């Protein structure tokens, strides 16, 4: 009986080698690991044949890449059939039903009704659908770079689905705010996130009003499902806007700047659910005074005042550097090289924040192609599961099982409560418990592997796995360990499952 723990220890014990120069196939595999969710069998060869830079240009022009298979799969997910107003109404009804049952249970002393009734079950199921939809899109879309950038921006502009109304606001945030702008202009994306009901609720700006202001007539708050009780200025969004979304923690702003930014966004709120729960600007709640942010004076101008600020922040050098460094950390190295960041900032300045141009500058930087950064980043749980599914030729279904696997590995999608989002760096994801969990996940995925034929000869089997799943990047050490574990296994199907699982769970595949 295989001891997975012992084998994992042996697999991870290999010494680091000297990185050789990249061949065209190596370059293709590297691009697929960083700008896509890993290579499907044979894809590194096909990309190398087309030309890596040509493939990258095609990915940057994602709208012209046919993606009919994904379009067909998306129709399986009923979450896409509902707009924000539909979900808002369903959520309101579910909350009211839960409250009714709670009142009945309190009045009768019979809590069994609450145990049997599950008024919020639909939203839990829809949440699972939303997570699995992300897996399916990342796994099978031909527009791989767009999916990578959707994940990056969703994490950069993080919203926690577990917070009240965001249970029904998050789907439209992803579909209408993030996805259409993932390869557009940063300024447009920043404005869209600021106006998003999901972000307004998550960071409490929907309840931010100028002190002493009051609505002109009766106005019911959304309470549990919306804006809550209005108490005055709320600084949460203003602080995260500057610290996380734009300038960075060292961006040169002061606490007074935070206060003035918060004043500028007073009145940015959300409609009630029965009106669609969309963005609304309440002029009565807006601070009408002039404000100064980073030494720049902003005259009181209602909603346009906030738009002017967002455009101003989007084009600050600190913002360009902060976001470019995050992009380089995601695509190049945990410690982003200065040359890569400088190239991205220069492209940002030249194009006023065109995301395609910034990405092009990163992937044409020498830092992106240096052998030292190849397979030097550890995959996040989401990247690991999706890349394993792609390599193994597994067709992800519309059940939440793969999303649940990602969650068990420590990255439940859309469930990071902190505005920082999930970490991208190796230090956050690598420990003995996490590696064992990944090995178990790899073994589960290996049982469904369709990309490797069943072969009697163990050496040929491992060679096939190396070539088809890993584009020839498997280390001699990993090959030796897998072959040793196959020694006493006579059944070819069992041998294939074990060998694929060890390869996917081993250190070579964990790196990208």
Image (cartoon, rainbow, N blue to C red):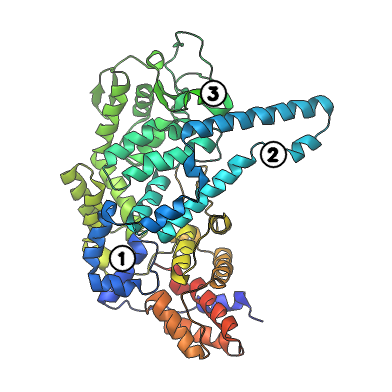
Residue drawn at the location 43% of the way across and 83% of the way down: 464
In the rendered image of this protein, does residue 16 appear above or below residue 386? below
Q: Residue furthest top?
A: 217
> Label 3: few (<14), some or many (≥20) within 10 Å?
many
Secondary structure under tag 3 reads loop
Q: CA distance from mark 2 to mark 3?
A: 22 Å
For the N terminus, the image quarter is bottom right
> Label 2: few (<14), some or many (≥20) within 10 Å?
some
Secondary structure under tag 2 reads loop
Q: Position of residue 54 (x, y in %)?
A: 21, 64
Mark 2 near mark 3, Cβ–Cβ under 8 Å? no
> Label 1: few (<14), some or many (≥20) within 10 Å?
many
Q: Which residue is mark 2?
A: 118
Specify whether 298 is left or right of 196: left
Work out whether mark 2 precedes mark 1 in sequence or the reverse, and give the earlier one: 1
In the rendered image of this protein, does residue 287 appear above or below residue 416? above
């Amino acid at each position: 009986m295989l001891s997975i723990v012992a084998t994992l220890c042996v697999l991870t014990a290999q010494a680091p080698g000297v990185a050789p120069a990249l061949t065209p196939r190596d370059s293709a595999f590297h691009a697929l690991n960083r700008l896509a969710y890993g290579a499907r069998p044979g894809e590194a060869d096909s990309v190398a044949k087309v030309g890596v830079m040509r493939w990258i240009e095609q990915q940057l022009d994602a709208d012209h890449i046919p993606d009919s298979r994904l379009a067909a799969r998306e129709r399986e997910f009923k979450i896409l059939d509902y707009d924000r107003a539909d979900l808002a109404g369903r959520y309101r009804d579910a909350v009211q039903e839960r409250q009714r049952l709670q009142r009945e249970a309190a009045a009768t002393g019979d809590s069994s009704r609450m145990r049997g009734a599950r008024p919020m079950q639909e939203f839990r199921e829809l949440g699972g659908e939303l997570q699995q939809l992300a897996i399916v899109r990342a796994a099978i879309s031909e527009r791989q770079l767009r999916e990578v950038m959707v994940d990056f921006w969703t994490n950069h502009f993080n919203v926690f689905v577990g917070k009240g109304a965001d249970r029904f606001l998050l789907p439209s945030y992803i579909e209408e705010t993030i996805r259409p702008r993932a390869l557009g202009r940063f300024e447009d994306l920043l404005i869209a996130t600021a106006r998003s009901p999901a972000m307004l609720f998550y960071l409490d700006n929907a309840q931010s009003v100028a002190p002493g202001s009051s609505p002109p007539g009766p106005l019911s708050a959304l309470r549990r499902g919306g804006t809550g009780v209005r108490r005055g200025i709320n600084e949460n969004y203003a602080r995260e806007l500057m610290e996380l979304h734009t300038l960075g923690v060292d961006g040169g702003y002061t606490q007074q700047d935070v206060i003035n930014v918060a004043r500028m966004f007073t009145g940015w709120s959300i409609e009630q659910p029965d009106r669609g729960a969309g963005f609304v600007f309440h002029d009565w709640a807006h601070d009408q005074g002039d404000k100064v942010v980073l030494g720049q004076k902003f005259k009181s101008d209602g909603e346009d005042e906030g738009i002017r600020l967002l455009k101003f922040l989007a084009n600050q050098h600190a913002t360009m550097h902060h976001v470019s460094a995050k992009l380089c950390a995601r695509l190049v190295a945990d410690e982003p090289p200065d040359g890569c960041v400088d190239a991205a900032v220069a492209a940002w300045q030249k194009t006023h924040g065109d995301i395609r141009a910034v990405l092009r500058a990163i992937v044409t930087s020498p830092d992106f192609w240096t052998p030292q950064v190849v397979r030097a980043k550890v995959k996040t749980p989401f990247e690991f599961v999706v890349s394993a599914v792609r390599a193994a030729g597994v067709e992800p279904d519309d059940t939440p099982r793969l999303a649940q696997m990602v969650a068990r590995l420590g990255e439940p999608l859309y469930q990071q409560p902190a505005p920082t989002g999930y970490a991208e760096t190796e230090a956050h994801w690598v420990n003995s418990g996490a590696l064992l969990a990944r090995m178990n996940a790899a073994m589960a995925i290996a049982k469904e592997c369709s990309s490797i034929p069943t072969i009697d000869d163990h050496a040929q089997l491992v060679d096939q796995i190396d070539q088809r799943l890993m584009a020839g990047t498997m280390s001699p050490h990993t090959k030796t360990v897998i072959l040793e574990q196959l020694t006493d296994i006579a059944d070819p199907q069992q041998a294939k499952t074990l060998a694929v699982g060890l390869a996917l769970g081993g250190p070579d595949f964990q790196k990208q």
